[in-house]
Image: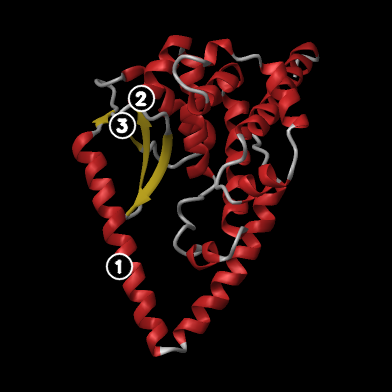
Amino acid sequence: MRFEVNPKEKLYFILMLVISLLIYVGLVFSIIGIFYLFLFGMMGFVSHGLYVGHIRGNGIRVSNKQFPEIYQTAEQLSKQLGLERTPSIYILEAGGLLNAFATRFLGRDFVIIYSDVLELAYEEGEAAVRFVVAHELAHLKRKHLKWRYLLSPAMFIPFLGSAYSRACEYTCDQIAVQLAPDGAIFGLLVLGVGKKMYKKINLEEIINQSKEERGFWIWLSEVSSTHPNLTKRLSKVSSDRLLVSNNKYLSSSLNI
């Protein structure tokens, strides 16, 4: 299965890699620079280790005996994505927050799904759960977390790091749509709209809104964010979903 990558992800990755390497080279030739590089590296390492420890100590680990349907879905998706192993998946209660994310520590990959996301996803069936998991596994497929520390210096360049992050999100949405087209729309609505309002959303109006809502402050808000605006993501996912459905229909008609 061939997965499309957002073109901007490749462009921003190259820019960030070049800038980061130049910064690293500059720091290496400075004694104070080496000290700060080591200091900030250790601070980041320890804080991230503490957070992963919190997840492992307080989250519920998914297995073939604990949420087995999610475990089987993750294993299947990992194979489809060509991952070497299925990452550890934890369900975490977060006081009503709606989110899911992937992280990596000491060479080990983790996917964390907040319990409210999972609860809502179950109301809509396996397809929605599949999309949420597929999106996070796509980050691992694209090695977004593996390159994180190498690219860290460029994250301080105004707008560049956030632009790269948004492009990565578009890529992961696109991959998840290919793997779970039926759960794509709801999967995003769960993360962006909330518990009670998602069933009342008119998708066509959201698409129209993404075209009509323009202006400097909307633009500035988005370019400062690590995620694309929800209306734009839903519009793009809707378009990708239709394309995937048409391709499947064409393949079936031609007996490919």
Closer-to-camera residue (33/138): 33
Contact flag, marks 1 and 2 (Cβ < 8 Å): no
Q: Which residue is mark 3?
A: 94
Which residue is painted at 28% across and 47% down in the image?
52
> Quick check: can you spot residue 239?
no
> Quick check: can you spot residue 52?
yes
**What is the quadrant of the N terminus in the image?**
top right
Give the mark, 3 or 2, whose residue is nearer the N terminus.
Answer: 2
Which residue is painted at 39% across and 89% down in the image?
31
Q: Which mark is residue 143?
A: none
Q: Which residue is mark 2?
A: 71
Which residue is painted at 62% across and 37% down in the image?
229
Q: As displayed, is residue 92 above or below residue 156?
A: above
Where's residue 81, x and y in %? 53, 35
**124 horizontally vs 16: left or right:** left
Q: Which residue is mark 1?
A: 42
Where's residue 136, x and y in %? 47, 36
Closer-to-camera residue (209/94): 209
Looking at the rendered structure, the secondary structure element under dot 1 is: helix
**What is the quadrant of the C terminus in the image?**
top right
